[in-house]
Image: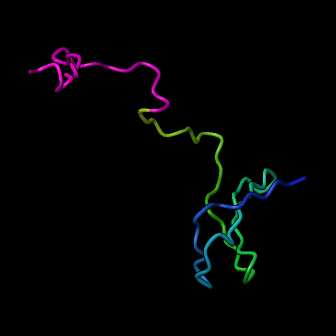
Amino acid sequence: MTIKRFIAGAVCQACGQQDKVRAWDDPNAQAMYRECVACGYTDVLAHASEHTSELLTRVNYTDPVFDEDVSPVRILDPRSMH
């Protein structure tokens, strides 16, 4: 069974309606599709590949590198400066 999910905020390229686009993966065709439920427009978003890996970002990077000159920030209470 294919699970089709709506893409929040997406705008259809054909009819221009917002929040009417849904997407799903087709493992047999190794592709991802999107479809507008308002006008029926469908296209292929991307072809999946066995060698495709997730892009490296600061969220999924497991070994962060910190600069040596980084120091903690001190937050001062302006009321205590009298």
Q: Residue at x 78, y 55 (%)?
A: 26
Q: Give the quadrant of the C terminus.
A: top left
Q: Is residue 9 above or below residue 50?
A: below
The x, y position of residue 31, in whole percent, is: 70, 57
Q: Main structural element of the magenta stretch: helix, strand or loop?
A: loop
**Tell me, what colour scheme is on the image?**
rainbow
The x, y position of residue 50, in whole percent, is: 66, 41
Q: Residue at x 75, y 80 (%)?
A: 40
| Between 59 and 24, the one nearer to me in the picture | 59
Q: Is residue 40 above or below residue 1?
A: below
The x, y position of residue 59, in whole percent, is: 47, 32
Left or right of 14 on screen, residue 66: left
Left or right of 15 on screen, residue 65: left
Q: Residue at x 61, y 74 (%)?
A: 18
Left or right of 39 on screen, residue 71: left
| Between 4 and 8, the one nearer to me in the picture | 8
Q: Residue at x 18, y 24 (%)?
A: 79
Q: Is residue 60 above or below residue 46?
A: above
The span picked out in magenta is 59-82
Left or right of 77 on screen, residue 3: right
The x, y position of residue 60, in whole percent, is: 50, 30
Figure label count? 0
Q: Quadrant of residue 39?
A: bottom right
